Image: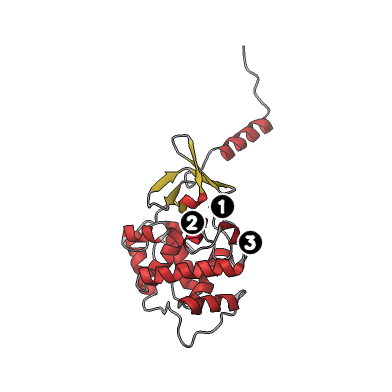
Amino acid sequence: MVTPRRPRRLRILALALCAIALPSATSAHLVILTDGSVLKVLAFAVDDETAVLSFTKGGTMRMPMLRVERVIDDEVVPDPEKAAEALAATALDYPVRFAAGSVTPRTSYGELIFAAARRHKVNPDLVAAVMRAESAFNPRAVSAKGARGLMQLMPATAKRYGVRASELFRPERNIEAGVRYLAFLIDHFAGDLPKILAGYNAGEGSVDRFGGVPPYRETQSYVRKILGFLGLETSTVVGLAR
């Protein structure tokens, strides 16, 4: 018996649906847990306060979002050492701490940024640049990876500073936790701006493991973007796409 051929339009539709169903090669993520362990997953989703991890060889795992510190794309730059060295040279001696001459950023939430930055001895311009990169000053922003609010904090990070997940859409609470985390990173990395920014994106544990800005394309591009917001020249950084 000869199976009749489907009309061309139906064949195209079937192929399109298959393409949608198949995960792309770039969809892999690294899920960094609060205990320091790292899981490589094919897909990551958030279901209310639960993280859903899907694995390459099949199967899924569910866990509370409070166990997830970071989720980053599992893609590395072609020459990570040179890229990290260029980032370090770009940001040499940038003042990350609050100074006597610091002024209120001319941005949305400038007053809240300045007050929290002064309280925790962080350069308010640095806070504003991170907020711009993270949420574009949208207090209701939610990422596909579960980060929330102005400073795009994961619930686990917010919990470290006494902020509940339910409070992350309150600008003053979100900014307070985000600035406290930046202050921690400033101390942890002795004022090294690229490491501070990389820690904010990928977690301080990732930076510690690699001894500098991790080789992840997402993280290095993130650092480069914020350096640009701060007016630091980044055009010579190799291995990074704008």
User: Which quadrant is the N terminus positioned in?
Assistant: top right
Q: Nearer the viewer, mark 3 or mark 1?
A: 3
In the rendered structure, which amino acid carries the disc numbered 2?
Ala
User: Secondary structure beneath disc 3?
Assistant: loop
Q: CA distance from mark 2 to mark 3?
A: 18 Å
Residue closer to the observer: 62 or 16? 62
Q: Residue furthest top?
A: 1
Q: CA distance from mark 2 to mark 1?
A: 16 Å
| Residue 238 x/y as whole percent | 39, 64
On the image, numbered disc 2 is attached to which residue? 156
Examine the image and state in which quarter residue 188 appears. Answer: bottom left
Is residue 7 depicted above or below 191 in this figure? above
Residue 154: image tag: none
Q: Is residue 137 left or right of residue 221?
A: right
Q: Nearer the viewer, mark 2 or mark 3?
A: 2
User: Secondary structure beneath disc 2?
Assistant: helix
On the image, numbered disc 1 is attached to which residue? 144
| Residue 56 x/y as whole percent | 45, 38
Tell me if mark 2 has few (under 14), some (14-19) or many (20+) residues whose alpha carbon lies within 10 angstroms of its own.
many
* Number of numbered discs on residues: 3
On the image, numbered disc 3 is attached to which residue? 140
User: Secondary structure beneath disc 1?
Assistant: loop
Q: CA distance from mark 3 to mark 1?
A: 13 Å
| Residue 126 x/y as whole percent | 48, 74
Pointer 2 or 3: first along the chain: 3
In the rendered structure, which amino acid carries the disc numbered 3?
Arg
Is residue 87 depicted above or below 145 in this figure? below
